[in-house]
């Protein structure tokens, strides 16, 4: 039973109120909100459209309509609605904030930042706004600016797990792992059962070389979900860094058992095999990964490089050619391909010349 079916009596009551008092805007706003809660966005738009016919300059209604178009990923229509709201009131915080979010989704970062700054001028102590600005800086790889704004959000809401998590992730990008651990743990104090935060904390400890602490958090993750594929990947990488190669192989095998249709474990285990000079076994795994992800040019490059290591130039040429076909603008791969072809031709020519001399 969906949300609408569970609350059909309430919906009917509000519709009846609208029939009796067709000019009372509160009922329209409530009915529209309920439709949104039930993900019935077209129905909500119909209600808000009726309300705008009654009050065409109602800012909250326009914001609600813009938000629905944002949810529906119709970003240009959302911008049109928010711009209409600004024509009515050019000093509304929510409009600038929502416009910033919309432009950010379109990756029009300058326009997004411009709207965030206008919102900031109206409200200087808004934690979600500082978080949005931080995430924008993060998208632009401006991690120090991201950190500064995440910290401003936390100063306003210190016990918000999401803000601490976001800040910790920014520290990870800056390779400031001690700071990352501190904020991951602050987030875990609020949400101790959050599996993703536990995993991130394990990875941060692993990056610090503190494998004993990392294992505590890995163990917590596996307690929460014994079939968490990504956790096995991270655990195997940690074991490799620790030098426990045989244990890492076993963990990769567990990941393959959990999700044989995902390519990452095949690739990473193959990479490990290459580092251990087990080239033939590695090539088998790369081939398996190719079957799962046939449009990944990087897997073909791995397979080509490994073919070269076992002196199979014909196999390497085939792999590099597949990579070039998928990514024809990758000059490095093109060079690998032509260098291998050249080496193959030279060897064949020299061999034929040697046979003739006999």
Image (cartoon, grey):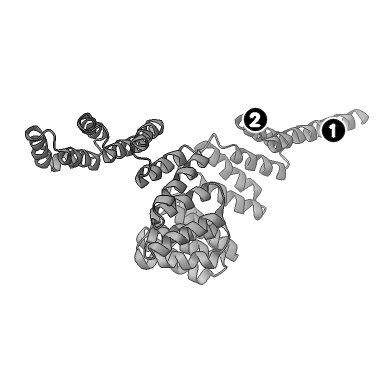
Q: Is residue 227 visible?
A: no
Query: Disc 1 and disc 2: Cα gap in Å?
Result: 32 Å
Q: Secondary structure at mark 1?
A: helix
Is 146 or 61 nearer to us in this picture? 61
Residue extending farthest right: 357
Residue nearest the observer in this picture, 48 or 311: 48
Position of 236 with respect to 193 (left or right) is right
Residue 272 vs 208, above or below: the answer is above
Residue 3 percent location from the top left of the image: 19, 42
Q: In which image quadrant can residue 338 be found?
A: top right
Q: Residue at x 49, y 48 (%)?
A: 136
Give the x, y percent position of residue 129. Answer: 41, 52
Residue 93, above or below 180: above
Left or right of residue 76, residue 174 in this image? right
The answer to whether any part of residue 285 appears in the image is yes
Residue 52 screen position, x and y as percent: 24, 32
Please state the horizontal and vertical placement of residue 118, each as a whole percent of the image.
Answer: 44, 46
Q: Residues within 10 Å of mark 2 (few under 14, many from 20)?
A: few
User: Which quarter of the rendered picture does the C terminus lie within?
Assistant: top right
Q: How many marks?
A: 2
Q: Quadrant of residue 62?
A: top left
Foreground tag (1 vs 2): 2
Residue ID at (9%, 41%): 9
Give the label on residue 328, or none: 2
Give the label on residue 288, or none. Answer: none
Quadrant position of residue 311? top right
**Quadrant of the image for the N terminus?**
top left
Disc number for residue 351: 1
SS label for mark 2: loop
- Label whose residue precedes the other's in the sequence (1 or 2): 2
């Amino acid at each position: 039973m969906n949300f609408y079916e569970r609350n059909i009596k309430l919906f009917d009551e509000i519709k009846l109120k609208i029939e009796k008092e067709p000019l009372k805007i509160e009922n329209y706003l409530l009915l529209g909100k309920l439709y949104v809660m039930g993900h019935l966005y077209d129905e909500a738009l119909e209600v808000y459209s009726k309300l705008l016919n009654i009050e065409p300059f109602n800012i909250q209604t326009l914001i609600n309509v813009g938000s629905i178009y944002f949810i529906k990923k119709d970003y240009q229509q959302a911008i049109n609605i928010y711009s209409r709201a600004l024509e009515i009131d050019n000093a509304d915080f929510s409009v600038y904030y929502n416009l910033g979010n919309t432009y950010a989704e379109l990756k029009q970062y300058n326009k997004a930042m411009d709207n965030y700054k206008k919102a900031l001028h109206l409200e200087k102590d808004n934690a979600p706004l500082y978080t949005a600005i931080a995430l924008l800086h993060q998208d632009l790889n401006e991690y120090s600016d991201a950190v500064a704004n995440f910290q401003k959000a936390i100063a306003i809401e210190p016990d918000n797990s999401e803000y601490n998590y976001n800040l910790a992730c920014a520290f990870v990008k800056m390779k400031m792992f001690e700071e990352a651990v501190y904020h991951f743990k602050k987030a875990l104090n609020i949400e101790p059962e959050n599996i993703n935060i536990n995993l991130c904390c394990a990875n941060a400890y692993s990056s610090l070389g503190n494998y004993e602490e990392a294992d505590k958090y890995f163990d917590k993750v596996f307690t929460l979900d014994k079939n968490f594929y990504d956790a096995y990947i991270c655990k195997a990488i940690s074991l490799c860094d620790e030098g426990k190669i045989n244990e890492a192989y076993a963990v990769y095998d567990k990941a393959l058992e959990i999700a044989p249709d995902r390519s990452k474990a095949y690739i990473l285990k193959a990479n490990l095999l290459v580092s251990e000079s087990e080239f033939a076994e590695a090539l088998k795994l790369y081939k398996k990964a190719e079957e799962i992800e046939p449009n990944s040019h990087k897997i073909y490059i791995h397979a080509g490089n490994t073919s070269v290591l076992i002196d199979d130039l014909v196999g390497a040429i085939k792999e590099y050619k597949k990579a070039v076909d998928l990514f024809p603008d990758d000059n490095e791969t093109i060079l690998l391909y032509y260098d291998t072809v050249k080496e193959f031709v030279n060897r064949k020519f020299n061999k034929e010349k040697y046979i003739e001399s006999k």
